[in-house]
Image (cartoon, rainbow, N blue to C red):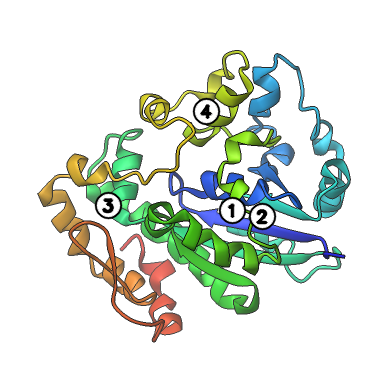
């Protein structure tokens, strides 16, 4: 019998964590909860996208979660979903830390999804029209904090890169499923065929709604990428728009930031002309991480 496992998918905003969470949560023994912490944050709570599109006032599966003690959050979700592996993409270090090392009766897995900073910048700027100097520290800060969490819990940690995962999902997801204690299921890549109940609403959710032939999504679902996702409906694709949308000068500014190069070098990666390039192993990762959190806004 598979022990109850909670998989925290961590990433900066707009870095592919929802997509990765949907795929993992499409496994026959897993359930995707979305940004589960929202249930206990009234100011951030949103409707279950699937149930809202059905015209329901509350989620068929997760209704009443906010009344459950936080310590019991995942035991309760396991009972509601009937699945032993629960996937949470709250993207919050503080939320994940609450469940590390406690007497909760479940194993913890931490998956850090890192997006090429140029690709991330293109995504972020579609929502916030600010220059590299204003936005890049957000990528640095969040990724450094998440990397530091994984470094403190190495036996439960896995780092993956969105751009590599999207370019070859089959090869990319096989080791991720294994890390989560699950056999690889190719059907999980077509996550839109599974009715996911969770607090998530971005472009990746649109394929699931279209597959179910439901009504219009809730108001908070609208994104800056609606047209792009509509053009790639129910397909596996790599988002490479940054190559055209980020100017050569902006790309050079990102590449010239020593904090970026140091962070990526710790994972054997560097910025190449078309994406991330592999440069070697993980030598010096702990040393490189030390101080990055405090320097990210420097």
Asked whether the residues under the numbered discs 4 and 1 touch, taking CB atoms below 8 Å apart as contact, a structural biologist would say: no
Q: CA distance from mark 2 to mark 4?
A: 26 Å
The quadrant of the picture occupied by the N terminus is bottom right
Q: CA distance from mark 3 to mark 4?
A: 24 Å
Picture coordinates of residue 171, whole percent (x, y):
48, 62
Q: Earlier in the sequence, mark 3 or mark 2?
A: 2
Q: Earlier in the sequence, mark 3 or mark 4?
A: 3
Element at badge 3? Answer: helix
Q: Nearer the viewer, residue 8 or 175?
A: 175
Residue at mark 1: 92
In screen coordinates, is 272 left or right of 89? Answer: left
Q: Nearer the viewer, residue 146 or 227?
A: 227
Residue 162's image quarter? Answer: bottom left
Please give the label number shown on residue 118.
Answer: 3
Q: CA distance from mark 4 to mark 1?
A: 24 Å
Asked whether the residues under the numbered discs 3 and 1 touch, taking CB atoms below 8 Å apart as contact, a structural biologist would say: no
Taking the spot 37% from the left edge, 27% from the top edge, the residue there is: 231
| Residue count near mark 4 (Cα–Cα under 10 Å), binned few <14, some 14–19, many ≥20 | many
Q: CA distance from mark 3 to mark 1?
A: 22 Å
Please give the label number shown on residue 95.
Answer: 2
Residue 155 vertical placement versus 79 (above, below): below
Element at badge 2? Answer: helix
Residue 18's image quarter? Answer: top right
Asked whether the residues under the numbered discs 1 and 2 touch, taking CB atoms below 8 Å apart as contact, a structural biologist would say: yes
Q: Earlier in the sequence, mark 3 or mark 1?
A: 1
Element at badge 1? Answer: loop
Q: Earlier in the sequence, mark 4 or mark 1?
A: 1
Residue at mark 4: 206
The quadrant of the picture occupied by the C terminus is bottom left
Taking the spot 59% from the left edge, 41% from the top edge, the residue there is: 191
Residue 228 vertical placement versus 28 (above, below): above
């Amino acid at each position: 019998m598979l022990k109850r496992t909670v998989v925290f998918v961590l990433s900066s905003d707009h870095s592919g964590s929802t997509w990765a969470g949907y795929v993992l949560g499409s496994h026959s023994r897993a359930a995707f909860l979305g940004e589960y912490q929202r249930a206990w944050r009234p100011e951030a709570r949103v409707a279950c996208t699937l149930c809202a599109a059905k015209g329901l006032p509350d989620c068929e599966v997760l209704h009443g979660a906010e009344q459950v003690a936080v310590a019991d959050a995942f035991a309760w979700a396991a009972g509601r979903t009937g699945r032993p592996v629960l996937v949470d993409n709250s993207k919050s270090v503080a939320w994940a830390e609450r469940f590390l090392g406690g007497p909760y009766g479940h194993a913890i897995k931490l998956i850090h999804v890192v997006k090429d900073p140029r690709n991330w910048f293109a995504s972020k700027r579609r929502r916030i029209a600010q220059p590299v100097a204003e936005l890049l520290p957000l990528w640095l800060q969040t990724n450094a904090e998440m990397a530091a969490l994984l470094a403190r819990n190495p036996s439960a940690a896995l780092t993956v890169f969105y751009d590599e995962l999207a370019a070859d999902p089959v090869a990319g997801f096989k080791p991720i499923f294994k890390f989560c204690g699950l056999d690889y299921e190719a059907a999980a890549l077509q996550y839109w065929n599974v009715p996911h109940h969770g607090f998530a609403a971005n472009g990746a959710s649109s394929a699931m709604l279209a597959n179910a032939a439901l009504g219009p999504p809730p108001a908070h679902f609208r994104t800056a990428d609606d047209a792009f996702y509509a053009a790639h409906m129910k397909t596996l694709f790599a988002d490479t728009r940054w190559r055209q949308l980020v100017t050569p000068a902006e790309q050079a500014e990102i590449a010239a930031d020593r904090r970026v190069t140091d962070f990526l070098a710790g994972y054997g990666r560097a910025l190449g002309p078309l994406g991330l390039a592999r440069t070697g192993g993980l030598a010096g990762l702990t040393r490189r991480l030390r101080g990055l959190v405090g320097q990210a806004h420097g």
